[in-house]
Image (cartoon, rainbow, N blue to C red):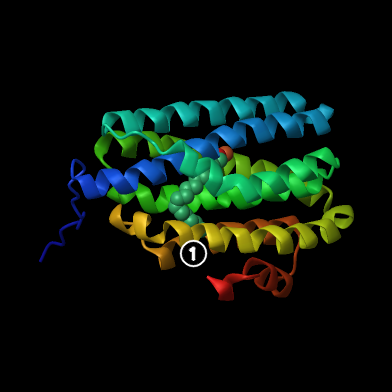
């Protein structure tokens, strides 16, 4: 018997769908907007890589535009106040780190945590998205790998000096990810994205990144699950 690909269908015009979308879409738009500004900030701390970081920032600007179009296409108004509040703690931590010149912490927050978070969300969204959003998200997720990879490479090259700060920054910021995930579990489910699968995908990218940077399997297991029991 031939197997049929099962693709759940959603009523993209229902009020329930649009209501959940108004928050998830806003989070994604705000995340892309902050990513743009974070890469520009990192370029200030790292003059040698400024051109490259400005390039990454421009990609984030394009992502922001793409996801704004996705909301428009579904006639959804993104709840940007909700999204700003949603990111406020993580963004505050980034800005503090930047103000103190703590580049390693900036890398961990933006290029590892936020990019792995985005990759998990986009991966799980693609199979359940409307056709318009699907095309856009497929392109975006490729870029996010480039971003994660950039962070990985830089941290790998500076592993010895960066290790302690990475562990500290992980401790401070990873619990926020689980908290943020819990805040959107219900909305994500309306869009067809399951919490357990999001966690799994996040752990894969984040754990792989930590391994590539130089952490031992034991260290990275401990680090990538930090604070997860509260989720
Ligand atoms: C940077 O390039 C992009 C930043 C965008 C962040 C998007 C976050 C989307 C969150 C909605 C679903 C929760 C996924 C949780 C994964 C642990
Ligand atoms: Fe992005
Ligand atoms: Fe990115």
The residue lying toward the viewer, choosing from 28 and 198, is 28
Q: Is mark 1 within 8 Å of ligand 1?
A: yes
| 2 or 180: nearer the viewer | 180
Q: Is residue 116 visible?
A: yes
Q: Residue at x 32, y 39 (%)?
A: 134
Tell whether 212 sits left or right of 23. right
Residue under the point 25% across and 48% down: 17
Whole-percent x and y of residue 12? 21, 43
Residue furthest right in the image: 161
Picture coordinates of residue 218, whole percent (x, y): 71, 75
Residue on which the image places disc 1: 199
Measuring 18% from the left and 51% from the top, which residue is drawn there? 9
For residue 215, above or below residue 70: below
Note whether 18 is above or below 120 in the view shown.
Answer: above
Left or right of residue 18: residue 11: left
Is label 1 in a helix, a strand or a loop? helix
Residue 38, quarter of the rendered image? top right
Label 1 neighbour load within 10 Å: few <14, some 14-19, many 20+: some
Q: Which residue is at the front of the view, 33 or 88?
A: 88
The answer to whether residue 152 is visible is no
Describe residue 56's horizontal placement relative to residue 6 as left or right. Answer: right
Tell which residue pokes out farthest to the left in this image: 1
Q: Quadrant of the N terminus?
A: bottom left
| Residue 98 picture quarter | top right
Point out residue 146 in the picture as x, y percentages from the top left corner. Answer: 59, 39
């Amino acid at each position: 018997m031939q197997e049929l690909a099962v693709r759940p269908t959603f009523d993209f015009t229902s009020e329930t769908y649009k209501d959940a979308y108004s928050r998830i879409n806003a989070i994604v738009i705000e995340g892309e907007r902050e990513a743009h500004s974070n890469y520009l900030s990192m370029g200030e701390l790292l003059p040698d890589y400024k051109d490259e970081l400005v390039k990454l920032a421009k990609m984030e600007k394009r992502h922001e535009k793409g996801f704004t179009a996705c909301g428009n296409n579904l006639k959804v108004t993104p709840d940007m106040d909700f999204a700003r509040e949603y990111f406020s703690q993580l963004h505050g931590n980034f800005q503090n780190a930047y103000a103190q010149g703590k580049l390693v912490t900036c890398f961990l927050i933006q290029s590892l945590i936020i990019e792995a978070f985005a990759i998990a969300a986009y991966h799980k969204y693609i199979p359940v998205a409307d056709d318009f959003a699907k095309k856009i998200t497929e392109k975006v997720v490729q870029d996010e790998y480039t971003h994660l990879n950039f962070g990985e490479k830089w941290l790998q090259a500076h592993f010895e000096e960066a290790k302690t700060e990475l562990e500290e920054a992980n401790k401070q910021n990873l619990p926020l990810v689980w908290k943020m995930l819990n805040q959107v579990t219900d909305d994500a489910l309306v869009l067809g994205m399951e919490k357990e699968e999001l966690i799994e995908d996040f752990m894969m990218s984040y754990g792989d990144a930590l391994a590539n940077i130089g952490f031992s399997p034991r260290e990275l297991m401990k680090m990538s699950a930090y604070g997860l029991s509260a989720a």
